[in-house]
């Protein structure tokens, strides 16, 4: 398991999306704005997570990404493995055993196994719950619709102007 900036951003984005999952699909633009991660980087991350079945996408106005399965069933390790390419085994140098490389490799392998077990034990749901306990309720946006078809609040316009030629004539006659 390799902990990288990409895996850190992926976990952060999944928590952000999980906090807002009850509001419908979450756009990458919204995650980008809240988390200060570039949209193109998020597109790469979410493409990999979609390929691994962690998220699903909805196209069109009001579209975005949502969890493909329950947050209890997604571990931090699942997210990290989805966005990182599989580690390739490093070729050992010819004098590796003589220089102590092999014994150090056993240490790293053991550490990697412990880290993997720990990351498997942390669910996305537990991270979302921890975030909610720190910040309280996540603010809901005004409308579930987004994009070009979003409804803007309208204020009622009232006027005392006549609404037809006849009403105008009647108003002019009564004013003299």
Image (tube, helix red, strand yellow):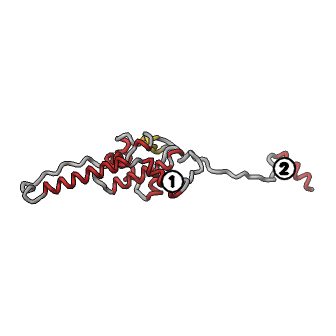
Q: Secondary structure at mark 2?
A: helix
Q: Residue at x 13, y 54 (%)?
A: 102
Query: Dot 2, crowdedness within 10 Å: few (<14), some or many (≥20)?
Result: few
Residue behind mark 2: 168
Residue behind mark 1: 132
Q: Residue at x 47, y 48 (%)?
A: 18
Q: Residue at x 16, y 51 (%)?
A: 90
x, y (%) of residue 141?
57, 51
Seen from the viewer's position, the closer of residues 162 and 111 is: 111
Residue 91 relative to residue 1: left or right: left
Frontmost of labels 1 and 2 is: 1
Up the image or down, 115 lies above or below 52; here it is below
Up the image or down, 164 lies above or below 34; here it is above
Quadrant for residue 5, please give it.
bottom left
Tell me the distance, in whole angstroms, between the alpha carbons under discs 1 and 2. Answer: 60 Å
Residue 137 relative to residue 74: left or right: right
x, y (%) of residue 84?
30, 49
Q: Secondary structure at mark 1?
A: helix
Seen from the viewer's position, the closer of residues 130 and 56 is: 130
Seen from the viewer's position, the closer of residues 59 and 139 is: 139
Residue 142 numbered mark, or none: none
- For the C terminus, the quadrant is bottom right
x, y (%) of residue 40?
38, 52
x, y (%) of residue 54?
39, 42
Specify which label sits upstream in the sequence, 1 or 2.
1
Q: Are marks 1 and 2 in contact (CB under 8 Å)?
A: no
Q: Residue at x 17, y 54 (%)?
A: 105
């Amino acid at each position: 398991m390799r902990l990288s900036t990409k895996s850190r951003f992926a976990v952060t984005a999944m928590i952000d999306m999980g906090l807002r999952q009850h509001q419908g699909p979450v756009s990458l633009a919204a995650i980008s704005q809240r988390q200060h991660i570039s949209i193109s980087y998020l597109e790469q991350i979410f493409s990999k997570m979609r390929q691994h079945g962690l998220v699903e996408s909805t196209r069109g106005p009001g579209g975005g990404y949502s969890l493909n399965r329950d947050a209890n069933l997604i571990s931090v390790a699942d997210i990290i493995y989805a966005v990182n390419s599989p580690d390739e085994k490093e070729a050992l140098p010819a004098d590796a055993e003589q220089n102590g490389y092999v014994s150090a490799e056993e240490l790293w392998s053991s550490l990697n196994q412990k880290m993997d077990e720990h990351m498997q034990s942390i669910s996305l749901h537990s991270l979302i719950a921890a975030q909610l306990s720190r910040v309280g309720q996540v603010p809901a946006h005004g409308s579930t619709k987004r994009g070009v078809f979003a409804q803007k609040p309208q204020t009622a316009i009232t006027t005392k102007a006549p609404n037809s030629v006849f009403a105008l004539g009647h108003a002019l006659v009564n004013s003299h």
